[in-house]
Amino acid sequence: MRTILVPLDGSQLAEHILPHVKTMAPLLGADLRLLRVVSEAQMTGGESWGYALAAVYGVPESEELQREYHDASMEALRQRAQAYLDAHARVLKELDLTVTTDVRCGSPAETIVQAASECGGDAMIAMATHGYGGLRRWALGSVADKVIHATNAPVLLVRGEAPATVHPPRRILVPLDGSGLAQQALPLARELAHAAHAELILLRAVVPMIEAYVGAPMLGRPIAESSEAISSLREYALEDLEAQATALRAELLHILTHAIIGYPAEVIVDEAREMEVDLIVMATHGYGGLRRWALGSVADKVLHATTTPLILVRASEH
């Protein structure tokens, strides 16, 4: 990971990501790129320039004069945006971080996705978004929602409350379901755990419905009453996790494996809270280019329910 792209829009909410990237960048050996997107809607609140000028002066202005006003206003916005980013960059550089700034014009979500794609697959996007306490749903901002559904880059999302303190992660949770797609979250989680000397927790949810298991007969009934069957499924899940852990222990000392009976999203959110996890790293399905991610139902539920910082890694079929 060579670059962490940090979109900032001038709000205190967006700036809540900064304490997190201060700790994340050294762990990944990444540079920071602060991005501010200037849109024409910022100039007039979405009204056309011709309408605005007519409202002020009572008469329509020529197209040439409208263009001059437009260009001058956009330049003023760009200069203010650059000054804003420069101020944050100075503070970050005092921490010996490598920081660049980037001011662009356009649609915020599309511009963020494009900026990340220009990093050649070596970027992570880091954003703060609105949220509520407990297990109430995040009120994902429209920009964050569009970005996570369009980008190929991993996305770090933090719930938009000013953190009291932010420290390198001490416990990192990686949900696995036995698939190769889910395992694609492991390289990034392993890198972070190694750099932070953090405990890595491999988690598997054992779904208490026989229909959830490949090759199981479609009986249409829960198997919770069969303690022997559910115990066997849990033991199988633990064996699979231990195999993963064994492969990782050559470079990581602290690895835990947990197989919990329950539905995946609920298990992930509950375990993250109860074990005081600092970071969840999980993979989700997606497509290449700018096509929308087909966010798996589990990832989507976790995204909207957890209060723990979350990195979503787009998994590839190839």
Image (cartoon, helix red, strand yellow):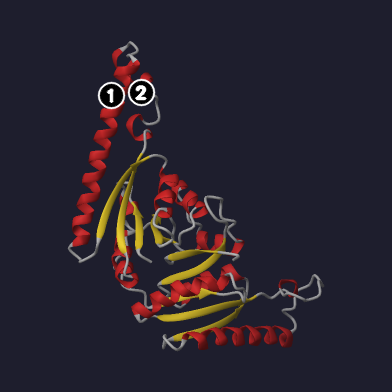
Q: Are marks 2 and 1 in contact (CB under 8 Å)?
A: yes
- Checking the image for residue 49, the label placed there is 2
- Give the quarter of the figure containing the N terminus: bottom left
Q: Is residue 316 left or right of residue 227?
A: left
- Checking the image for residue 172, the label placed there is none
* Residue at image point 55% right, 74% down: 183
Q: Is residue 315 visible?
A: yes
In x, y percent, where is residue 103?
30, 45
In x, y percent, where is residue 95?
20, 66
In the picture shown, does residue 92 fall above or below 66? Answer: below
* Residue at image point 33% right, 64% down: 20
Q: Amino acid at mark 1?
A: Tyr
Q: Earlier in the sequence, mark 2 or mark 1?
A: 2
Q: Nearer the viewer, residue 30 or 218?
A: 30
Residue 212 lies in quadrant: bottom right
- Give the quarter of the figure containing the C terminus: bottom right
In x, y percent, where is residue 225?
74, 81
* Residue at image point 23% right, 40% down: 80
Q: Nearer the viewer, residue 272 or 193?
A: 193
Q: CA distance from mark 2 to mark 1?
A: 8 Å
Q: Amino acid at mark 2?
A: Trp
Label 1 sits on a secondary structure element that is: helix
Dot 1, crowdedness within 10 Å: few (<14), some or many (≥20)? some
Q: Which residue is mark 1?
A: 69
Q: Is residue 159 visible?
A: no
Dot 2, crowdedness within 10 Å: few (<14), some or many (≥20)? some
Label 2 sits on a secondary structure element that is: helix
Q: Is residue 222 left or right of residue 169?
A: right
Residue 199 lies in quadrant: bottom left
In the picture shown, does residue 64 fall above or below 122? Answer: above
* Residue at image point 26% right, 55% down: 100
Residue 208 lies in quadrant: bottom right
